[in-house]
Image: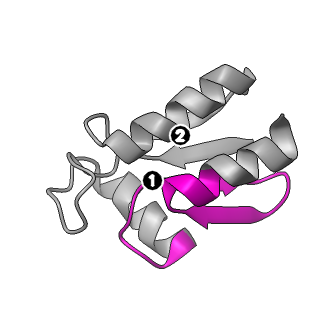
Amino acid sequence: MLELYQAEGCPHSTEVREKLTELGVSYVVHNPRLTGDEGGDVLNGQAHAQLTAIGGEDSIPFLVDTAREETRYESEAIVDYLEDHYA
């Protein structure tokens, strides 16, 4: 399962969502913060706690691939990962 920690108004999150849609991959969305800016207002405390517990950083977008036990930060790295494993 793919899980994407993201913010709706974040252009980097949009880039990742568009790649997931392009590839036809199902995923779960978590919206921990209102914006993509580090330290932005927390929208969902539980999702924010999971983000920092799993990845160790307060940064989005953040992808968790539970099937491969892989995680990625940064939209470019996430898109490359998706192309390598899901294209």
Q: In which quarter of the image is residue 46?
A: bottom left
**Front-most of residues 20 and 3:** 20
Please check the rendered image and state whether residue 39 is part of the magenta-colored stretch, yes or no: no
Pick the quarter of the image with the N terminus. Answer: top right
Quadrant in the rendering for residue 60 = bottom left
Q: Residue at x 40, y 46 (%)?
A: 12
Task: Report crowding for label 2: few under 14, some 14 to 19, many 20 or more residues within 10 A (C-alpha).
Answer: many
Amino acid type at mark 1: Pro
Q: In which quarter of the image is the C terminus?
A: top right
Residue 72, horizontal then vertical, whole percent: 62, 63
Helix, strand or loop at mark 1: loop
Side (left or right) of 83 relative to 58: right
Given the current orientation, which residue lies at the most extreme bottom position? 56
In the rendered view, tell whether residue 21 sits above or below residue 53.
above
Lateral position of residue 44 relative to residue 34, left or right: right
The residue that label 2 is drawn on is 16
Residues under labels 1 and 2: Cα distance? 8 Å
- Mark 2 lies on a secondary structure that is helix
| Amino acid on which the number 2 mark rests in the picture | Val
With 79 as the anchor, is 60 left or right in this view? Answer: left
> In which quarter of the view is residue 11 placed?
top left
Instruction: Give the magenta part as a residue range.
Output: 55-78
Residue 23 drawn at (x, y percent): 73, 25
Task: State the residue at coordinates (56%, 55%).
Answer: 76
Residue 77: x, y in percent?
Answer: 61, 59
Q: Are marks 1 and 2 in contact (CB under 8 Å)?
A: yes
Q: Name the residue under label 1.
A: 61
Looking at the rendered structure, the number of numbered marks drawn on it comes to 2
